[in-house]
Amino acid sequence: MLGTPWHVIMRFLTEERNDRPEQSLQLTNKSSVFYHAAMSSSTERFEVALNTPAGRVTAVLDVAIGFVPVTSIVPVARRLGEDMLKLEEARVREQGEPVSCQMGCAACCRMLVPLSPPEAFALRDYVAGLPAERQDRIRSRIDEIDQRLISHGLASSLREIAETVEAIPDEELDPVNRAYYALRLPCPFLENEICSIYEARPAACRELLVTSPASFCDDMVNNQVVPVPVGVRIGTVLGLLWSTIKSEPPRLIPLPMALEWAERHAHEASQRWSGAELIDLLLDKIWRVLSHEFQVRGQTPPS
Ligand code: SF4
C-alpha cells in the first residue's frame, strides 16, 4: 500500500534528529518592517532560501512578529511546503513521469489524513467562518463518518491517536490506517468529488501527488501507486513545532476528529506566541527534516 501520510509522518516524528545542516538553509531578514493597518500586529518580511534535495527554493514571506496565535504560522509553512513540492514535481516531470492527479479525482480523499495541532486549529477557524448552512452540512457528514467508525470499532482508536501523549509506532498505526482505508469513507469535506475547502485543505492533502495512472489510486493496497517524493512534510514540521512550544510529545490528529479535537483544546488555540519565535522554530524544524531527507536520499546538501 502507498506509504500514507500517517506512516511517513509518524516514522519521522519518532526519529527526530538533532544535527543541523547549516548549509542547507539560509535566512536573510530584509530590513523592511511594516505595519498592516488591517492587522493587529506588525509584520516583518523575510527572504528565505532553502536548499532541498530537489533544488533551491527562495521565498519572500510576510510574518506576523507580535504575539500571535499558532495558526498564524500555518499559511507561511504551507507556502514553503508548496514551493518545495513544485520543485519535486518539476523533477519528476523532467524524468518523463508527469503527475497524474486531476481535478475531480478524489481517490486519495478516502485515506486517513493527519493534521498537526496548528492545522486543526486553523481548520476549525476556517469552518467557523463558513455560512451556517455549509457548517451544518460538514458537521452532519462528520457525524455520519463517526457512526460508521463506531460501528467498525475504529472511532475509539482514532480518538486515542489524537489524544495520546506517547509516540505511536508504525506497527500500531498501520492496521488502523488499513482498516480506515478499507471503509473507503469519503472525507467530510468532499463534495461531488471535489474538495470543498481547497484553499484551506491540510498540508498532507497538498503533498499527496502520484505519477502512476490515476486509476491505480482506486485500490492503493493492490496497485503499485507511485507518489511524488516529498522532501519536507509540513504536517511533520508543524507537529514538531507544536511539540516544542507545548513541551509535549508530537501528535497528529485524524482529519475526521480534527474539529472536535480543536474545540476540546480551544484554550490552547487562544494562547499567544511570539511570531518571531514561531518563524525561527518553523525554519529550525524544516532544517531538521531536510537534514533527514538529504541523508535518506544519499545526497549531500550543497555548500
Ligand atoms: S480536505 Fe479536501 S483534499 Fe483533503 S482529503 Fe478532504 S476533500 Fe480531500
Image (cartoon, grey):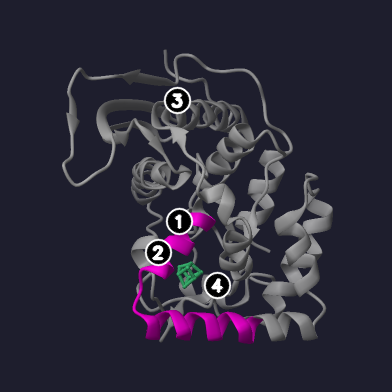
Nearest to viewer (mark 2 / mark 4): 2
Q: Amino acid at mark 2?
A: Tyr
Point out residue 268 in the picture as x, y percentages from the top left corner.
58, 48
For the C terminus, which image quadrant? top left
Q: Amino acid at mark 4?
A: Cys
Identify the residue at horizontal 37%, vertical 32% (top origin): 55
Q: Element type at marker 2?
A: helix
The residue that label 1 is drawn on is: 122
**Which circle's residue, 3 or 2, is located before the other in the chain?**
2
Q: Main secondary structure of the magenta part?
A: helix
Give me the disc on residue 280: 3
190 lies above or below 298 = below
Label 4 to label 1: alpha-carbon separation: 28 Å
Q: Is residue 298 left or right of residue 166?
A: left
The quarter of the displayed image where residue 12 is located: top right
Tell me where the magenta segment starts and ends, as one range: 120-145
**Which circle's residue, 4 or 3, is located before the other in the chain?**
4
- Magenta-span inclusion, residue 222: no
Nearest to viewer (mark 4 / mark 3): 3
The residue that label 4 is drawn on is: 217
For the N terminus, which image quadrant? bottom right
Q: Are marks 2 and 1 in contact (CB under 8 Å)?
A: yes
